[in-house]
Image (cartoon, grey):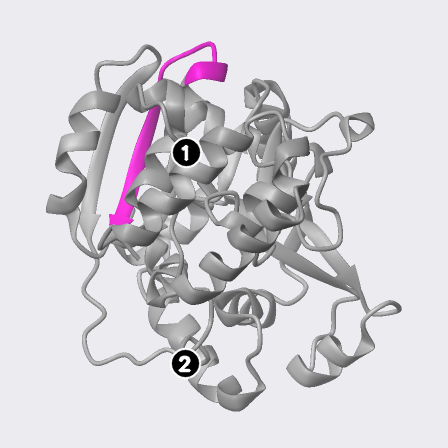
Amino acid sequence: MRFVYCVDKNFNYQLATSIFSLLKNVNEEINITILHEDSKSFLNIKSKLEKLPNIKNIEILDVDIGNTSFPKIKNSHVSKATYFRLFIPRYVKHKEHLVYLDADTIIIKNPLAILKKQIKQLDASDKFISACIETTKEASGDIFERLDLQSVNYFNAGVMIINGKLANRPDVTFEMINTMESLDENIKYWDQDVINKHFDLQIKTLDNRLNIKIDDNSPKLNFDLDPHIVHYAGSSKPWTLEGLLDTDSHFFQNSYLELLGKNLFFMTTNWKIGTLKLILKEIFTFSIFQRKNYLKIIVSTFILLISKRA
């Protein structure tokens, strides 16, 4: 089975952590393809991952976007790498079905049995993609009006099975870019909008256990849903102070610490002043001291604040 990720160098550690969690939970060898903005930046981590069990091959492909410009990424929490998903049919030429994973996913239970069943169902259908339902026309009519969708479901693109038939359509990336350009200002949720529009009525519903979200509305994981893949879909990621404080961040952080043998949490921020204000508030109100790993959170945060890392 082949898994595909799309990232830039700012997500190298998140990518490595997701891959590590995947390799730790599967029970057979898998292949991984990475569409990357700067493949050289990942080579050291790649070497470490290749020594782990259950990896057959890791290939990294540099994505050339040419003169393509991507809408709605300025002043957002995503980069142009989120649009690399549109380039998968152009770069990944393997004829097998592909399992796409966002780099902010963590695998906590072997997903292969469910994936194989879902692949068979997709193969027997006339659909090109399988993905989990994000919302419905009844619940979010504005999305369907904005994108002029015929489907009654809007899908989350964080975990997808991509039909191998797309490998026989070399022009599909060009077609999706045309769809993106035609949507223009109507795009709100980046390439997820593009994928939903371009494959309208051609997306099959994926088993929800493969994409259980932790986000601003559901910050704690619901184990009653039998999650196999956890998706940190909100803006408060588990590597930010907000995410460490408000979400079930330990699925990510524990995998990161185990992979790299670190003692402190992996953290980033786009706003150091805001992070400083938040950690000081937590300290002066004594809220931080109610947390099991309060010392590790405090030290990790202040190291982040004095470092050059964003």
Whether residue 210 sits left or right of residue 278 in the image: it is: right
Query: Where residue 265 is drawn, which disc sits there?
Result: 1
Whether residue 237 sits left or right of residue 50 in the image: it is: right
Whether residue 248 sits left or right of residue 222 in the image: it is: left
Nearer-N-terminus badge (1/2): 2
Q: Which quadrant of the rendered structure holds the N terminus?
A: top left
Three-letter amino acid code of the residue under disc 2? Asn
Query: Where residue 178 is drawn, which disc sits there?
Result: 2
Front one among 165 and 133: 133
The residue at the far right in this view is: 138
Q: Which segment is the magenta one?
A: 24-35
Where in the figure is residue 274, as x and y percent of width and height?
Answer: 48, 65
Where in the figure is residue 140, as x and y percent of width and height?
Answer: 81, 71
**x 70%, y 32%: residue:** 209
Where in the figure is residue 252, as x and y percent of width and height?
Answer: 49, 32
**Residue 41's quadrant in the figure?**
top left
Where in the figure is residue 272, as x and y percent of width and height?
Answer: 39, 62
Query: Where residue 143 is drawn, which disc sits there?
Result: none
Whether residue 14 sits left or right of residue 237 in the image: it is: left
**x 29%, y 38%: residue:** 33
Front one among 92 and 34: 34
The residue at the far front in this view is: 284
**x 43%, y 85%: residue:** 181
**x 59%, y 51%: residue:** 233
- Circle 1: is it few (<14), some (14-19), or many (20+) Cα within 10 Å? many
Instruction: Report helix, strand or loop for mark 1.
Output: loop
Three-letter amino acid code of the residue under disc 1? Phe
For residue 205, above or below residue 289: below
Front one among 14 and 112: 14
For residue 35, above or below residue 86: above
The answer to whether residue 4 is seen in the rendering is: yes
The answer to whether residue 212 is seen in the rendering is: no
